[in-house]
Amino acid sequence: MGHYRSHLRDVEFNLFEVLGRGEAYGRGAFAGTTSETARDVLGEVERLAVGELADSAVEADRTPPAYDPGNRTVTLPESFKKAYARWTESGWHLLDLPESLGGANVPPSLRWAVAELVLGANPALYMYQSTAGFAKMLDRLGTEEQRGLARLLVERGWGATMVLTEPEAGSDVGACRTRAVQQADGSWHIEGVKRFITSGEHDLGENIVHFVLARPEGHGPGTKGLSLFLVPKFRIADWRTGELGDRNGVFATSLENKMGLKASATCELTFGAETPAVGMLLGERHDGIRQMFHIIEQARMIIGTKSMATLSTGHLNALEYARVRTQGADLTALADKSAPRVPILRHPDVRRSLLLQKAYAEGLRALVLHTATVQDRIAEAEAAGLRDDAAHALNDLLLPVVKGFGSEKACEHLGHALQTLGGAGYTQDFPLEQYIRDTRIDTLYEGTTAIQGMDLFFRKIARDQGRTFAALLAEVRRTAADTPANGELAEAHALLARAAAHLEAMATTLGGHLLASLENPPAIYQVGRSTTRLLMATGDVLVAWLLLRQAEVATRNLADPPRRTPRAFYRGKVATAIFFAREVLPLVAAHHDIATHEDHTLMSLPDDAW
């Protein structure tokens, strides 16, 4: 067996037993996707993921892509290219495209369930297959000619990239210096240098279309002056057939040497240094940030799903090791030197760590799929020609939690999984050391954790005066207030109610500081020091809520379990929810207490005192 251990049973449990996708699939906007079809798709993708896709992930880490400075090209390992070809030939990567672009228009919840399986098996491979997301964006926002480009992306398997970050600007997008100069024929010449561009150069397809954020010449600073341009690696000679023309003036001028996720070619791209980098404007001028956020939000969901998927397989690898690794006697027999050695799974602290890993892995899966069902609502409304504003707002609120909280907790508990293996986990004999290296980037990708915390509070809570956040907490409270069918869950319900109250009070405290800053600007520092804390507390409350919902379903099923499912699965769900509530939720009160007490030490300490 390879490195990847999937958990398809838990994926299906979330979709069909907790989130009610069986009632949504097969009708309305999702008429073409029945529950049976969804299960078949998941089964086929899992078979491919645990086999051919996972097999190439390790080799591509050991022998990563190679950069040729003479040709400014990147070559990937043959085994990786073979796995990528197998995946794209299967067609599963196009599932959620509209039928007009060759897809099956499946529900977002199914798409993200599929994504987990591939991201857990071979995350870099999934990140190269960006075709569908960019094609959908072109189909929605582009001109008639650009919608034809969307068709070419799909039919010819071209790559696509999000080209945003610059060496000196970093996360300050408004500091973008890449410029665009309009030509007499209506095209644009792009000039500048971009860094940290995922899949910026590779040999997986004949062409790559770069989506480049740049500033049209003569327009002022800040994000409002930015536009989005399409710059292909090779110019397109025939827009009907996709026949390629001359090499365009965009080149990979270096390949980043990274600590992990080495199979993913992260490049520096230089535009227009030697020959013009010819592009076309996407949509209207100065709409670049809004357009780019369609890609950024998709990317943040990918990263959150990737983190969760890696934590899940990391936990399952650690659990398997703990079952077979014998060391030490049972604590009740420590005085007996002749006592038999026991598997380390029998030691209390190992069990504590593993159960917490399980809680976060399964809780983050529930968070990703719950967010995906909100996206189902958005898709259903759009299919009916409507806009579900509440669903859009809730999705926006959840995304920084999925990405920021999810990536931080995945990194933290992959570290605990490594502890389970001890020194053996630090070797390349086990996948944990690669998992940790490959996941560390997730806390930085598409905005650091601090940026996600600021996004959650300033853009998602304060901007709509806390309405969406309050509505979500009201749903959490309804679950907490329900009389549990299982008496042993009563304590967890009470703990959830208290934690939700502390979380709401923390957000209110930060809102007070924000209002105070209108008269006293330094008051904003009290907000800035606690936004990451708010993000983490929000994630813990939501995970506890979703685990408790799972436990209620499991309790009912324990009374009348489906014949195909062992009772142990459901008992584990109940125990996990109880354990998480006891182990984690009391910490939310501490977060609230720290956020409530003003502390001016942080900003008053002179720079030379550090």
Image (cartoon, rainbow, N blue to C red):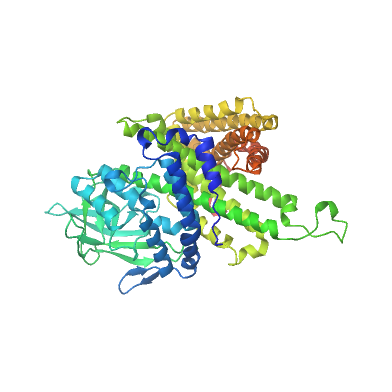
Which quadrant is home to the C terminus?
Answer: bottom right
Q: Residue furthest bottom?
A: 70
In the rendered structure, the answer to whether residue 596 lies left or right of residue 453 reads: right
In the rendered structure, the answer to whether residue 519 lies left or right of residue 363 reads: left
Q: Nearer the viewer, residue 518 or 72?
A: 72
Q: Nearer the viewer, residue 272 or 241?
A: 241
Residue 22 visible somewhere in the drawing: yes
Q: Residue at x 66, y 43 (%)?
A: 568
Q: Is residue 41 above or below residue 233?
A: above
Q: Residue at x 25, y 65 (%)?
A: 273
Q: Residue 336: x percent and y percent?
A: 88, 58
Which quadrant is home to the N terminus?
Answer: bottom right
Q: Residue 446: x percent and y percent?
A: 42, 50
Q: Quadrant of residue 67?
A: bottom left
Q: Residue 81: x percent and y percent?
A: 39, 65
Q: Residue at x 58, y 55 (%)?
A: 314
Q: Nearer the viewer, residue 436 or 316?
A: 316
Residue 597 visible somewhere in the drawing: no
Q: Quadrant of residue 105?
A: top left
Q: Nearer the viewer, residue 219 or 485?
A: 485
Q: Residue furthest left?
A: 184
Counting the numbered discs, the total is 0
Q: Quadrant of residue 106?
A: top left
Q: Residue 143: x percent and y percent?
A: 20, 45
Q: Is residue 277 above or below residue 143?
A: below
